RNA sequence: GCCGAAAUAGCUCAACCUGGUAGAGCAACUGACUUGUAAUCAGUAGGUUGCGGGUUCAAUUCCUGCUUUCGGCACCA
């Protein structure tokens, strides 16, 4: 048989040889390095037997696929170790995830703690020393069911496989697992791994099912890579917005209001800059701005469909024997504003914006710093228009979103979410039309997107803008939702060019999504070292000696303040080094040291955060420089 | 909401396993020092150990209920 290699070379081998034998024939050292192979486009184990002409690429620890195989096999080793320590354990699934793997385990009445992870790790280390090989074999469905009859989760998985499908299992020392593979040739490759954390996880991701114990871990081929990864995890912790929020006095949380953040003066300043920026943009883009009430009568929520579809997330209260709900969304209020006037097609697209404070009852376990809260400000807007205007308007919006995120240097991708299975209002035909309009707009721009079936809002399909934070978590921020249902429910109309009353279509959209969440993301994104334009304190002035330099410093901060620059003067009787250290730990963009030279020549001596260099310039020059920076949103 | 873990001074942590009613650094306050790019020295004050209940002669420590937080799951902007 002829085997073709990636470099284009071809070589003849006797048919029926295993990949190990083929590698051995090429060179014994190659055989040693091989982990798996890519045979005709498919990853396979090294003991796979080849009997016909094929294309073949050997995968060594240098190839990215190898790392996935290593981690997958490490998950099996974890299971083997757990089985040896807890013989009654049953196993769910043990897949690969970004940066590692996990295994879901049913331990019966046993409970694992962090402490046990160390023990399991030790047991795994012991097992790698035994150097057992990992062998694949193939069973029929009936054989597989018999083999795993003690393992209820595996039985469930096997039963779902189509009849007649080849079922592979992998066997190593005292452990056999149902698995598609491929795997390492042997456990000796598993040297540098770490079990990271424990969690409960529902079987098959369904909260109606029982919870299994999930063990997370990671593995690398070299110790250096493992250490580097563990350091990265430490780095990410340092960037945690909850930690930085405390250090930089941005916001606080209290047990008197779980999920209801308090904004401290510094955080408030940051927030105000983002809001001002938002207002500026929206005025430029031709939006009208409104504000609707926090609380509205239950009847309104019945009309909008929230009472039926969103009730469990809504807070309610009673006023004079009437039931009221605190708004979880701004749209119904916006509908009332629209209905106040008659509208003409000439006013379209009519863009109405609102920074609206909404409250949603989130599950207690979901709360997480500013990322997941129970009240937050949506930078909402509702755009009313004709059907013909949809595509153009969405294009405009995508351009606006792209600009907005570029200001912050944030990466994002777009997802198109379609009609939910059960919870939706309106006609399926209307939904199809709306979904197509969103897709058409993106397609016509050549904008890529991911399809996310069934994840739309109950009133319409949406485009979600997903931002990536420093922890590589994806957060939904911006959203564009096309709604043909609420205009119907609220009986919105406009006067068309022929004088007839017609139904408008509406877009809901938010750029930041939630100002709270967006700030959380920014904190981690910038590691607390904010660009000057949003930084709570932009300039710190530090006199070398209060007796000689304070008067000049006071004059200096006056002129900075007159120019709208956020500045603080450190007048404490402390050593220079002490005051500088504090300015640095608070990550203030500009640190100004004022001594004799500065006073004599009307200079400021500044150092930019993150840089070592000091620069002395005229006062006016400094002010001009920083104002330019702020204006350019840097 | 579910699984697991945690909660000690304003902050970061120690004492808890093995019960004898808390200790350090930073911050704050007072005084001395008068300083040129990441912590000057000395002193003072600061705690119903998250909240309740139990065991005990005695509970920060052991048990238990609740609250909150953390890591996940489920849910979501």
Image (spheres, rainbow, N blue to C red):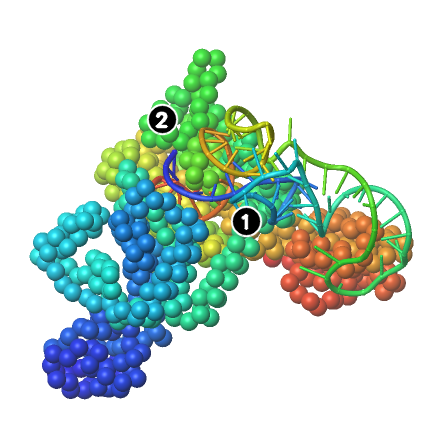
Chain under callout 2? A
The quadrant in which the N terminus of chain A is found is: bottom left
Relative to A513, does residue A185 appear above or below in the rendering? below
Residue displayed at 40% across by 31% down: A313
The quadrant in which the C terminus of chain A is found is: bottom right
Q: Residues within 10 Å of mark 2 (few under 14, many from 20)?
A: some
Q: Nearer the viewer, residue A149 or A600?
A: A149
Is residue A445 something that shows in the picture?
no
Q: Nearer the viewer, residue A63 or B49?
A: B49
Report the residue marked by disc 2. A307
Report the residue marked by disc 1. A241
In the drawing, what numbered circle is on residue A594? none
Residue A504 placed where, x, y %?
35, 35
Query: Do the numbered discs 2 and 1 sit on residues whose CB atoms are within 8 Å?
Result: no
Q: Nearer the viewer, residue B35 or A595?
A: B35
Select label 2 or label 1 by which is in front.
1
Residue A96 placed where, x, y %?
32, 59
Chain under callout 1? A
Is residue A440 left or right of B23 when viewed as pictured? Answer: left
Q: Nearer the viewer, residue A616 or A33?
A: A33
Q: CA distance from mark 2 to mark 1?
A: 34 Å
Residue displayed at 36% across by 75% down: A62
For numbered disc 1, what is the local secondary structure? helix
Relative to A429, does residue A535 appear above or below in the rendering? below
Choose top left, top right, bottom left or bottom right for residue A425: top left
Is residue A301 something that shows in the picture?
yes
Q: Residues within 10 Å of mark 1 (few under 14, many from 20)?
A: many
Residue displayed at 25% across by 77% down: A57
Q: Earlier in the sequence, mark 2 or mark 1?
A: 1
Residue A385 placed where, x, y %?
38, 39
């Amino acid at each position: 048989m002829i085997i073709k290699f990636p470099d284009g070379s071809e070589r003849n081998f006797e048919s029926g040889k295993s990949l190990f034998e083929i590698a051995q024939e090429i060179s014994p050292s190659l055989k040693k390095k091989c982990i798996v192979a890519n045979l005709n486009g498919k990853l396979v184990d090294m003991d796979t037997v080849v009997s016909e002409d094929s294309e073949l690429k050997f995968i060594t620890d240098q190839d990215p696929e190898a790392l996935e195989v290593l981690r997958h096999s490490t998950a099996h080793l974890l299971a083997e170790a757990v089985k040896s320590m807890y013989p009654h354990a049953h196993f769910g699934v043990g897949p690969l995830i970004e940066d590692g793997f996990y295994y879901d385990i049913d331990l019966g009445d046993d409970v694992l703690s962090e402490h046990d992870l160390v023990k399991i790790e030790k047991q795994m280390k012991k097992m790698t020393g035994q150097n057992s090989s990992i062998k694949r074999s193939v069973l029929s469905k009936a054989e597989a069911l018999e083999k795993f009859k003690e393992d209820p989760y595996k039985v469930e998985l096997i039963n779902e496989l189509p009849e007649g499908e080849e079922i592979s299992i992998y066997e190593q020392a005292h452990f056999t697992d149902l698995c598609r593979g491929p795997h390492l040739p042997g456990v000796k490759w598993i040297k540098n791994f770490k079990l990271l954390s424990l969690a409960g996880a529902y079987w098959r991701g369904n909260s109606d099912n029982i919870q299994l114990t999930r063990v997370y871990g990671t593995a690398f081929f070299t110790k250096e890579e493992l250490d580097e990864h563990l350091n990265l995890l430490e780095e990410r912790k340092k960037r945690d917005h909850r930690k930085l929020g405390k250090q930089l006095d941005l916001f606080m949380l209290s047990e008197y209001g779980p999920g209801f953040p308090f904004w401290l003066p510094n955080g408030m300043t940051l927030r105000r800059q983002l809001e001002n920026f938002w207002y500026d943009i929206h005025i430029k883009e031709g939006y009208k701005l409104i504000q609707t009430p926090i609380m509205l009568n239950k009847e309104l929520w019945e009309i909008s469909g929230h009472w039926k579809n969103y009730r469990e997330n809504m807070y309610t209260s009673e006023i004079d024997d009437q039931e009221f709900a605190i708004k979880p969304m701004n749209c119904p209020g916006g509908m009332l504003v629209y209905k106040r006037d008659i509208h003409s097609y000439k006013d379209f697209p009519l863009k109405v914006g609102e920074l609206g404070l909404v409250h949603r009852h989130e599950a207690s376990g979901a709360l997480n710093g500013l990322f997941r809260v129970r009240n937050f400000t949506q930078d909402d807007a509702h755009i009313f228009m004709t059907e013909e205007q949809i595509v153009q308007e969405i294009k405009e919006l995508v351009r606006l979103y792209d600009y907005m995120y570029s200001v912050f240097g944030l990466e994002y991708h777009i997802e198109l979410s379609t009609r939910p299975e059960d919870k939706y209002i309106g006609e399926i035909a209307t939904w199809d039309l709306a979904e197509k309009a969103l897709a058409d707009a993106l397609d016509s721009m050549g904008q890529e997107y991911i399809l996310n079936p069934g994840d739309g809002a109950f009133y319409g399909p949406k485009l979600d803008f997903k931002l990536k934070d420093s922890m590589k978590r994806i957060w939904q921020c911006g959203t564009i939702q096309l709604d043909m249902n609420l205009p119907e429910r609220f009986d919105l109309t406009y006067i068309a060019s022929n004088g007839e009353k017609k139904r408008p279509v509406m877009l809901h959209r938010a750029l930041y999504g939630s100002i709270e969440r967006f700030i959380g993301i920014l904190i981690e994104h910038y590691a607390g070292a904010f660009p000057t334009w949003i930084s709570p304190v932009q300039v710190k002035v530090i006199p070398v000696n209060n007796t000689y330099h304070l008067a000049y410093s006071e004059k200096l901060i006056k002129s900075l303040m007159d120019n709208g620059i956020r500045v603080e003067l450190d007048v404490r009787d402390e050593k220079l080094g002490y005051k500088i250290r504090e300015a640095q730990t608070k990550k203030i963009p500009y640190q100004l040291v004022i001594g004799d030279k500065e006073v004599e020549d009307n200079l400021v001596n500044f150092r930019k955060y993150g840089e070592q260099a000091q620069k002395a310039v005229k006062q006016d020059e400094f002010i001009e420089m920083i104002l330019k920076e702020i204006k350019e949103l840097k």
